[in-house]
Amino acid sequence: MRYGKEHKQATRRRIVERAGRRFKRDGIDGSGMSTLMADAGLTTGAFYGHFASKEELLTTVVADQLRKQSESFSSQAPPGRAGLEQLVREYLSVQQRDSPEDGCPSAALLDEIGRCTDATKQAYTDGVQASVENIAARLAPDDPPSARVKALTVFAMMVGTMQLSRALTDPRLADEILEQGIHNALTLLGADKHPS
């Protein structure tokens, strides 16, 4: 049976969405083709009608995940520093830590992305640049380039804080790491004067 273009596009979107969740939960190397396709309700053989390789799927997933993350922040967060505080608190939350499949691809996949092909690393680079520009534009709406270094620092701090909190077996220490990360990021952003 031949399906129309819309069906193929919807199936491809489903593969990308489900693979994004699986990659973030189990890692890139821990996500086999049969599991990725089963998550999408398809057979492994159907994969090659949509992607040439697992690496192509990964590149698409990374670009898609970071684009959605940036769009969500742009559309849902209040303007200015209040939006930055909301971003920091949501990103460094216990919920995000305990549900990596629903969270940021940076915190979940960064170590593996560093070992991927240039195409995947470029998709990641483009996504990070968009996130940093978004933060900088909220910090200094009239001159985003002036806030770029601070935005880079906050982005890196949040990702590292989340990775460290996820790696700990002591729940109290893991929570303390998140709280300190929130405090440090808000202090750096100058958003710590806003009420919680």
Image (tube, rainbow, N blue to C red):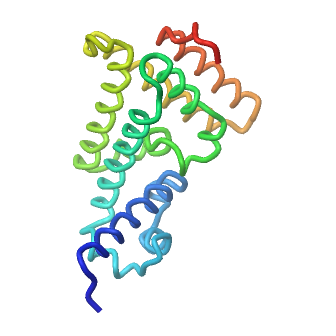
Q: Position of residue 32 (x, y in %)?
A: 45, 67
Image location (x, y in percent) of residue 89: 58, 27
Seen in the picture, residue 173 relative to 45 is either above or below; the reply is above
Residue at 54% in and 51% down? 101
Residue nearest the observer in this picture, 65 or 72: 72
Q: Residue at position x 54%, y 49% from top?
A: 102
Front-most of 55 and 71?
71
Say left or right for 52 vs 153. Answer: left
Using the rendered view, name the quadrant where residue 161 is placed.
top right
Residue 68 left/right relative to 49: right
- Quarter that holds the N terminus: bottom left
| Front one among 63 and 114 | 63
Q: Residue 56 location in percent, x, y? A: 27, 60
Q: Tell me the residue at 34%/46% (across/down).
A: 115
Rendered residue at 24%/69% (across/down): 52
User: Is 53 drawn above or below residue 165 in the view shown?
Assistant: below
